[in-house]
Image (cartoon, rainbow, N blue to C red):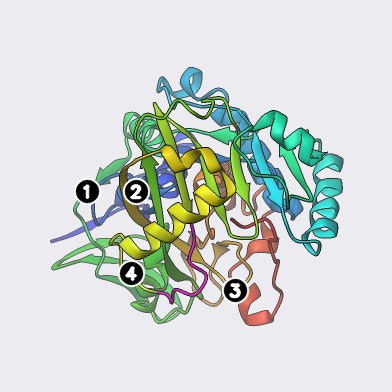
Amino acid sequence: MTERADIIVVGAGIMGCSIAYHLSERQAGQIVVLERDRIARGSTAAAAGGVRLQFSTATNIELSKRSMDVWENFEELFGTEIGLHQHGYLLLLTDDEQVPVFQENLRLQQTLDVPARWLSPDDVRALNPAVRTDDVIGATFCPRDGWCDPYSATMGFAGAARRNGVDIRQDSQVTSILRDGDRITGVEIGDDVIEADLVILCTGPHTSFVARTANVEIPIQPFRRMSFTTKPFPDVPSTIPFTVEFARGLYVHPEGPGFLFGMGDPDEPSSLNDTVDDAWMMTTIEALCDRFPPFINAAVHTGWAGFYEITPDDNPALGYVDDVDGLIVAAGFSGHGFMQGPAIGTCIAELVLDGEARAVDITAFSPGRFNEGRLAQERNVI
């Protein structure tokens, strides 16, 4: 079967649903979203839910600021409760070499009206009494940061997009992107074809594989990340910030009656393995108890694995692909995609309909920068 659409969005995570919604708000035509699994079941579902303004590049700060305005008003805008908790992000520094980097980041954040500040170890203990601070040099903290529920947020965008007439098809895996010379012509889904002049890839950790079906190389690699939750645990206040020991990438924040925690394995190679590694779970638990000693009395409730979609500079490929007419990519966010979903939707809709993103200048993240050697390194990656 062959059919026709104006725009095809591949992927129904936070990016695909937000982009489809924002395009539909501007009546961009017939929009079809194709999801290989179910809405919000990929990387979005496995996200820790963090939303923060503390970044080291102006583009990321502006994207997060615009997104935070949406997160703070999401229920009013979309009629969906997302469980936003703005207890702040507390970034702990234990390495002398990190201090000047984070102080420079802090100066940039403050010039862009981010209410972040530098904390002493005493300040850290006041915010999170569970932290062991004997080797903590300092920390940065932004009270506007926090976390929310990625599934509810994505379903909010998906529902609004559907009300606007967007056709979201689940269990519809794109097997090939079709092109005629330098022009995109549509996609294949098994034996079926949907023709379109514009295809937008929001395929997260699968992006490089999907792009290659159109002979396009995008340097995005999937890396497994595992998260765990504790059983109800009253020994640590449920009001602590989203706390990160930056050197190890160890994080913890309240989640329901317990806590959510995790830590990336820097030595694990790229793969699409989404099973939980019991050995790494134990390593993560040991690190959690080392940095936050009260958790030695906690019990693990459950765990899961998802993916970071990582690029050479830890920033997304965002915009039109060079030398291919009609292919846009919005992927490779390296762990900070969910939190920027609202702004990305706005920017991509503007790029399609106005010829440029006006809400936030995203040219620094253009996919062509990798071939040009024009990297935009993000230093606040957890």
Left or right of 223, for residue 38: left
Mark 1 vs mark 4, CA separation in Å: 20 Å
Q: Counting residues from the N terminus, which is met first, the one under dot 4 or under dot 2?
A: 2
Instruction: Tell me the amino acid under the disc marked 4.
Output: Leu
Kindly state the secondary structure of the residue where label 4 is placed: loop
Instruction: Tell me the amino acid under the disc marked 3.
Output: Pro
Kindly state the secondary structure of the residue where label 1 is placed: loop
Mark 4 vs mark 2, CA separation in Å: 18 Å
The residue under label 2 is 12
Q: Residue at x 76, y 51 (%)?
A: 58
Mark 1 vs mark 3, CA separation in Å: 31 Å
Principal SS element in the magenta part? loop
Q: Position of residue 296 (x, y in %)?
A: 45, 43
Q: Are marks 4 and 2 in contact (CB under 8 Å)?
A: no
The residue under label 4 is 272
Left or right of 196, for residue 26: right
Mark 4 vs mark 3, CA separation in Å: 18 Å
Q: Residue at x 73, y 38 (%)?
A: 141
Q: Nearer the viewer, mark 3 or mark 2?
A: 3
Q: Counting residues from the N terminus, which is met first, the one under dot 3 or under dot 2?
A: 2
- Residue 190 in view of the camera: yes
Mark 3 vs mark 2, CA separation in Å: 25 Å
The residue under label 1 is 170
Instruction: Tell me the amino acid under the disc marked 2.
Output: Ala
- Quadrant of the frame with the C terminus: bottom right
